[in-house]
Image (spheres, coloured by chain):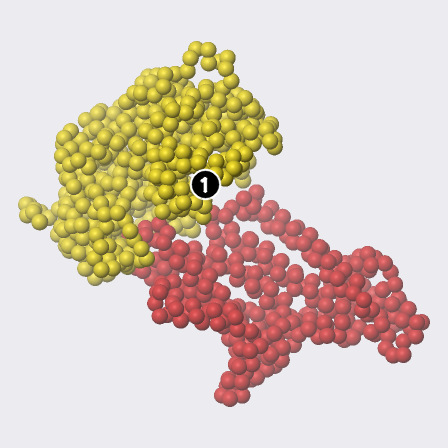
Amino acid sequence: MTAPTPGPAPALAVHDLRIAFAREGADTRPGAVGDGGVTEVVHGVDFAVERGRVLALVGESGSGKSVTAMSVLGLLPGTARATGRIEIDGAEVLGAPEETLRALRGRAVGTVFQEPSSALNPVFTVGDQIVEAIWAHHPETTPAQRRQRVVELLEAVGVADPRRIARSYPHQASGGQLQRAVIAMAISNDPTLLIADEPTTALDVTVQAGILELLRDLTRRLDTAVLLITHDMGVVADVADEVAVMEQGSIVETAPTRQLFAAPRHAYTRSLLGAVPELGVRSRGPVPADEDAGTTTAAAELVDAVVTFRGSSGTTTAVDHVSLRIEPGEFVGLVGESGSGKSTIGRTLSGLVPLTSGRALLAGIDVGTARGSTLRRARSELGLVFQDPASSLNPRHTVGRSIADPLRLHTDLDQPARRARVLELLDAVRLAPALADRYPHELSGGQRQRVAIARALSCRPTLLIADEPTSALDVSVQQQILELLRRLQAELGFACLFISHDLAVVGELTTRVGVLRAGRLVEQGPTATVLGDPQDAYTRRLLAAVPVPDPERQAERRRRWRELAETS
Amino acid sequence: MTFARFVLSRLAGMVIVLLAIALISYLIFYLLPANPAQLSCGRPCTPDRLAQAEAFMGLDKPWWAQFLTFLGGFFVGRTFGVGGTAIHCDAPCFGYSFRLSESVTQLIAERAPVTFSIAIGAAVLWLLLGVSTGVASALRRGSLIDRSLTTLSVAGVSAPAYLVGLLGIFLFGFTLNMVPVGGYVPLTQSPVQWLWHLILPWIVLALLNAAIYTRLTRGEMLEVMGEDYIRTARAKGLREGRVVGRHALRNVLIPVATVFGLDLGSLLGGAILTEKVFAMQGLGSLLLDAVGNLDLQVLVGVTLFSAFLIILANVVVDISYGLLDPRVKAGG
């Protein structure tokens, strides 16, 4: 099983790694191999990373990629048992005494996690936490030396104001700054190996581009080996030298990045690549609205809408003079980064957030001024689908009840009629009728999102607002949900406001798109025009920052992104 | 909002709540059918003497006038009666007990050190006990230690103070003859005796109250140990002791501090059962005696004082919250 490695030992070598969990309750993961009270989740994986190289471990949720990474650190939960070999710089890690492992962690192995805001302790300053990482392995340094080193490290990872960030608490810094600080902490003791577990998944795309650039740069500069855990093929194409594709606990294919993208050998790799929505692929959606559109009643319309929030630090303008018209049956995308106001616009149209000025119309009803039954009628014209179906469905209601709830509120259908409609809706979203009596926790993420869509469509809405409906899902599931939305929209003819940070998804699905930045609609027009020939500098930067799953093209895009970053 | 403004607004709110409590407790106690003048007029009580007593106590005036006089007492003091027999009660006047011939302020000042000694000592003890057992329980989740501690805390929560107190007295006081069975010696008189007399009540109170802290700390600890930043702390190569003691405990202590402040506040107002069991003359027994003797002035005064302590504890908790947790912006 283990191939002889010529030359010096790689920074990290993993041979026949198996990880099993003692079963707690009923773990009925599909594909799990039962073995008397233990469930094996990683079935003998082999890979190696050389210094100065980036290996991407790619897979969907539950593939075992994060567990594999944690086992390298010796940080598996107590119920887990790992066997095989894990060597760091030729030294065996598995089964090593705790004190040896502790000396490796943070010194030979630096780690960067997915969500920087929760990876840092909220009650200590960013600087103190980096100081601690240095102190843990170099207690001989003086406090002044450590503080000096923190500033140098923060500078090295491109934090603009290192002294201020060092003094800040995590909640006072932005996600991008925090992730840079976490990276600074990870490299504070010049590690041999850097483990980056979905390091940019929680970040905006323009921030992601900067972090990925930093990771590449550090790999070269510090001659560090990087084990990059990701589900994003664009990220892989951008930074990885080699790729190992993981499916249900096994590595199905390992190849140099270019080769993998050019000629994927394994069927799973091909399906993974095929599922990735690609920027620039033109949608096959319905044609844009007719010329006489302006004369009919819009499905939804914002007229010079302004929304402000009052906070402890003064008033923030979340939506800044936005005018947007969605024609009946039109598929409109709204893109922007976190804090751009895209979700606020969705909530304004639902009448959930009051307008400071301007008007919000839903099927001709002003939801800003409507009250009582008028507002309820307006809301019956609206369906909402949220990002995380696990939290937007009531865990104590059956699927059927969740779908039937809007029918009870807005129609006078009796119980059997509601039941019939629920089954009809389940069929429309391609779910088995038997699921009506199940609870959300018995369903997969994709099934739950189908239920959420069925619920949103139960009253035949004029407008469906889908707020990041696929961001919490795996790519292969995402593709199915998007396909479902497209089909339902074509069949039922509702208008859809599709809110997303993912330009590729919006490009594939919508006919018209608006680009939001800090509450302002900086650009809107037909999707092909906006994404193909963006007029606004921000739209161009946003587009340039999206990594495409094609190493050749991504290298070129990366060059252009750098040029744009320098000019702006 | 700046920190100073936040503190000021909290203090202003505290004054308003205290006024409301003063009014409500005054109304409840003074509108009771019991007539304090009747009690102090003795027997036989002629209508003449009753009227005299009422005038002396100010009970002949309408209730709102009485309430205003009562409030005024806090700031300027008050005088009962006129001429040579007049009794003066200095500001801050919480009322005057005609039964004990002493101002309520004086009574509280005499009794408070007893209660404070019991409460503060016990609170420190139960905090240490509760947090340490809670942490131990969480770190060894599901183990024998965890299960025994869980069982013990259920017992602790449900056991009544008088039972545990009497058992303690019986065992350590009478049978083993290790500690005094009751009474209080002021700290200023003999620190050693003070400590010696307080040990048993402290332990009894601590055992009963620690249970809640064990459970609270255990729950918080389990949650915090699952946080991402604990994983980060371990990935840095910190020793487990430091991960728990610094990164986890600091976050666990935030909610614990809240509950602790409130518990201590209410205990400072009088540990009635404990004082009774250990024959200590604290605020609790003062209140209990006042109830037994319908000494309304004392009742209202001590009630108000206790309310003041609880509200003060609330304000202190609110303010310290902002210091413990940097995410909580004062007034935000």
Residue B86 appears anywhere in the view: no
**Which shade is chain A?**
yellow
Q: In this view, does B239 lie above or below B279?
A: above
- Mark 1, Cα crowd under 10 Å, few <14 / some 14-19 / many 20+, is many
Q: Quadrant of residue B75?
A: bottom right
* Chain letter, disc 1 residue: A
Placement of A442 over or under B155, stated as above or below: above
Rendered location of residue A372, percent (x, y): 61, 32
- Residue visible at 37% across and 42% down? A435
Which of these two is toward me, B68 or B296?
B296
Badge count: 1
Residue placed at 50% from the left, 15% from the top?
A296
Estimate the x, y position of residue B86 in percent, counting from the top left: 86, 69
Quadrant position of the C terminus of chain B in the picture:
top right
Q: Hey, which residue is sitting farthest front in the picture?
A: A416
Secondary structure type for disc 1: helix
Q: Is residue B319 left or right of residue B31?
A: left
- Can residue A365 be seen here? The reply is yes
Q: Which amino acid does label 1 sit on?
A: Ser
The colour one sees for chain B in the rendered image is red
On screen, residue B39 versus residue A549, left or right, reads right
The spot of residue B139 in percent (x, y) is: 36, 63
The quadrant in which the N terminus of chain B is found is top right
Viewer-closest of A223 and A454: A454
Residue beneath disc 1: A402
